[in-house]
Image (tube, rainbow, N blue to C red):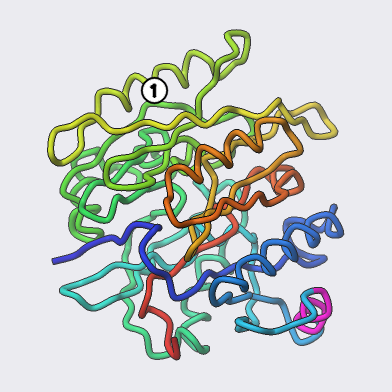
Amino acid sequence: MIRFPAEWEPQSGVLIAWPHDTSDFNHHLDAIEETYTFIAKTITQYQRLIIVCHDDSHQQHITSLLISDHNIDYIQATINDTWVRDSVFLSVENDGELQLLNFRFNGWGNKYPHQEDNALNHKLLAHSPFKGVSHQDIDFILEGGSIESDGIGTLLTTRQCLLNPNRNKGLRQADIERQLLQHLGAKRVFWLDQDSLAGDDTDAHVDTLARFCSATTIAYTRCDDINDRHYHGLNHMEAQLQAFRTPSNEPYQLVALPLPQPIFDGEGQRLPANYANFLIINHAVLVPAYGDPMDIVAAERLEGCFPGRRAILIPCRPLVHQYGSLHCMTMQFPEKVLMGH
């Protein structure tokens, strides 16, 4: 029996890929390194952090920023993008044994170069703490940010991403559901109709829209401004979520997360700032912050979803300038996955 653990289950570590002067954040590296430093120092207070870096000099540079190497493992590897949520292993429990799944990654529908990112997992397997961990290569394109799991067989996703011909061309919804059943143990799949948030280049990843907080609770992006371009689409998504039922046939408890005020890049393009892109770690929930009054509102609501966890605001305004946020740049691994933990 296969089970795809929920993010709130005990973790053995989190992985990030540190930006450098030839990576996707090279045009505003100073600002983004401040954010990465804040995130790294926060995570290592609670658990292990694996940092993918470029080479020896890059590793030394990161060490100088973090001051301490406590709870940190470094792995040197070449990458195309820092958004490891979508290229790094997904972890499943297979008959009680934890296993890493290496799905194919094609640069969000061949939008960007991705050869190094698609090869990253095999590079990780050559190094501690991944060396020796059971893994499986799967000939199916799937990104971690495109699916949400409640840990007991329900997956949440979007039609725009998983049914997009730029991912697994020729596969119908039933075909994709069979893949999710086979590899992730999905007993049922909830499909959202919502389009991408403005500036999102992932074809509507669900981790910008709606997230399981427990087997009975879903936090979701809500828009109350009738003049905002997202208003009608997000209201339709809210109605869909209201119609979904838990395995015991009860309505889900829905927790609305506001949208921050729109953020634009230098060319006037709106960026995909949202609060659904939070990260759950051991004993804390890390909440994206954008210097907006809604930051506190989102943090308070999410802290209420996770008893025993502290909500910590993480400055993510620099991240959205590369069209992602906190959850997109991280990947957690369940307890007992990483060797030596």
The residue nearer to you, when weighing 38 against 55, is 38
Q: Position of residue 125 (x, y in %)?
A: 46, 84
Q: Specify the segment rendered in magenta.
A: 58-65
Horizontally, residue 62 falls left or right of residue 162, namely right
Q: Is residue 161 above or below residue 74?
A: above
Left or right? Give the position of 243 relative to 257. Answer: left
Residue 156 picture location, percent across and down: 32, 41
Residue under the image location 23 percent in, 78 percent down: 97
Residue, disc 1: 238
Q: Is residue 183 magenta?
A: no
Choose between 23 and 304: the one closer to the eye. Answer: 304
Find residue 32 and report its horizontal and vertical position in percent: 78, 56
Residue 67, relative to residue 153: is it above or below? below
Determine whether, in the image, residue 22 is placed left or right of residue 70: right
Residue positioned 36% across, 33% down in the render: 159
What is the quadrant of residue 139 in the picture? bottom left
State the predominant SS element of the stretch in magenta. Answer: helix
